[in-house]
Amino acid sequence: MERKRLLLFAIIQILPLLILPPSWFSVGAIALIVVMVAIFAFLGWGLMRGKGWALTMSIFMQGMNVIVRLMMMFPNAVDQQGVWNVPLIILFLIAIGLSFWMAARLDRPDVRSLMVS
């Protein structure tokens, strides 16, 4: 059971970073997503191996995602015609909530002891 919990954290940590509106996906964005998936696969490998740096970097990346999403949400929440971009706001709030939960959960003593034992 412990191994499955670790695998779950290693895999789902990429989800909050991939939650974007479909209109934001382009060829360049897909290339960036591939790079992010590779980086998070490496972090997941580190988490599964119990590396402290992987845990620290995962928590850092989730925290940075919260900050970046907040910075991106406010200027993009309303378009130039004054119309609220509700799907973007909802997706960003979901991503912020998931990243916050993930960072808080990874920093708990029970999870930390599983990963850095």
Image (spheres, grey):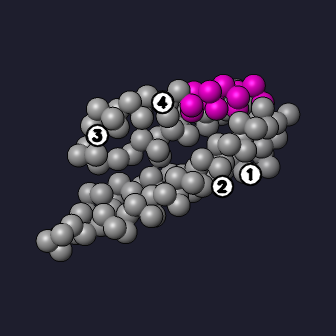
Look at the image and tell me whether residue 36 can be seen.
yes
The three-letter amino acid code for the residue at tag 4 is Val
Question: Dominant secondary structure of the magenta stretch?
Answer: helix
Whole-Å distance between the Cαs marked 2 and 4? 25 Å
The three-letter amino acid code for the residue at tag 3 is Phe
- Residue on which disc 3 sits: 25
The three-letter amino acid code for the residue at tag 1 is Arg
Circle 3 crowding by C-alpha within 10 Å: few under 14, some 14–19, many from 20: few
Look at the image and tell me whether residue 1 can be seen.
no
Q: Single out the mark in the foreground, 3 or 2.
A: 3
Q: Residue at x 60, y 47 (%)?
A: 61
Q: Which mark is drawn over residue 104?
A: 2
x and y percentages locating residue 81 in the rendered image: 14, 71
- Residue on which disc 1 sits: 108
x and y percentages locating residue 59 in the rendered image: 66, 48
Q: Earlier in the sequence, mark 3 or mark 2?
A: 3
Do the numbered discs 1 and 2 sit on residues whose CB atoms are within 8 Å?
Answer: yes
Circle 1 crowding by C-alpha within 10 Å: few under 14, some 14–19, many from 20: few
The magenta-colored residue range is 39-50
Q: Residue at x 40, y 60 (%)?
A: 72
Do the numbered discs 3 and 1 sit on residues whose CB atoms are within 8 Å?
Answer: no
x and y percentages locating residue 100 in the rendered image: 57, 56
Q: Is residue 13 above or below residue 69?
A: above
Whole-Å distance between the Cαs marked 3 and 2? 29 Å
Q: Is residue 66 left or right of residue 57?
A: left
Looking at the image, which is closer to me, 101 or 57? 57
Q: Is residue 48 above or below residue 76?
A: above
